[in-house]
Amino acid sequence: MAVCACCTKVSEADSLVLAAIQIMIGIFCVFMWYLLLILYMGQIKGVFGTYEPITYKTGCSLWGIVFIISGITIISVTRHPSQRQLTYAMLMNILCIIVAIISTILTVVELSSFESVSYRNYGQAKLGREISRVLLSFYTLELCIAFTYTIFGCVGLCRKNEDAHTAVTEQVEDAL
């Protein structure tokens, strides 16, 4: 496997696989948000009200768009490596880490508390909570992927800067 010019530890194929997984996780999260939207909008107002968890109110699953954009930036930096694009990809992955942590916290808060809902809406609330459990595992996976790429991208940037300083030092020494 050819070594990517920007990351000495992550190959080009590995970068593309990480990007594809990020894009698939983002698409899955957006589709799950749409399913939750349809699920919770179909509730009937009962005596105990409707079930609207915090992750639904904040559109937490819709934040998967950030995962998609981050995956696209990784593909871009793999195809056309430059220091600026690598920095942008790292910033997007740091944003992914932040979004994944916030999503995980909100989902754990949602799953830890369950208020009584109308018997008519109990099935929808139970299905919504199961979807949140599935999304919780995907948020954790996204956190690991973004964290991995950010670490190796930082190593790649540091090595590029060290190589640039070494080259400048050698030129100065040769001139003397």
Image (spheres, rainbow, N blue to C red):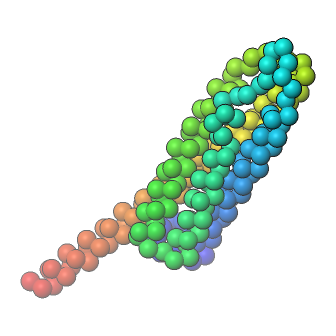
Using the rendered view, name the quadrant where residue 167 is placed: bottom left
Residue that sits furthest to the left in the current view:
176
In the image, taking residue 83 as reference, residue 170 lies left or right, namely left
Residue that sits furthest to the front in the current view:
45
Q: At 42% from the left edge and 59% from the top edge, which residue is drawn?
A: 154
Image quarter where the N terminus lies is bottom right
Position of 69 relative to 126 (above/below)? below
Q: At 77% from the left edge and 40% from the top edge, which residue is drawn?
A: 37
In the image, taking residue 145 as reference, residue 158 lies left or right, namely left
Residue 41: image location, x then y, percent: 81, 35
Q: In this rendered view, identify the residue nearer to me: 13 or 42.
A: 42
Residue 134: image location, x then y, percent: 76, 39
In the image, taking residue 136 as reference, residue 97 lies left or right, namely left
In the image, taking residue 33 as reference, residue 126 lies left or right, namely right
Q: At 74% from the left edge and 19% from the top edge, which residue is drawn?
A: 114
Residue 141: image location, x then y, percent: 65, 47
Q: At 84% from the left edge and 14% from the top edge, which residue is drawn?
A: 47
Position of 161 relative to 132 (above/below)? below
Position of 151 relative to 100 (above/below)? below
Q: In this rendered view, identify the residue nearer to me: 80 or 162.
A: 80
Using the rendered view, name the quadrant where residue 160 is placed: bottom left
Residue 77: image location, x then y, percent: 52, 70
Q: Is residue 105 visible?
A: yes
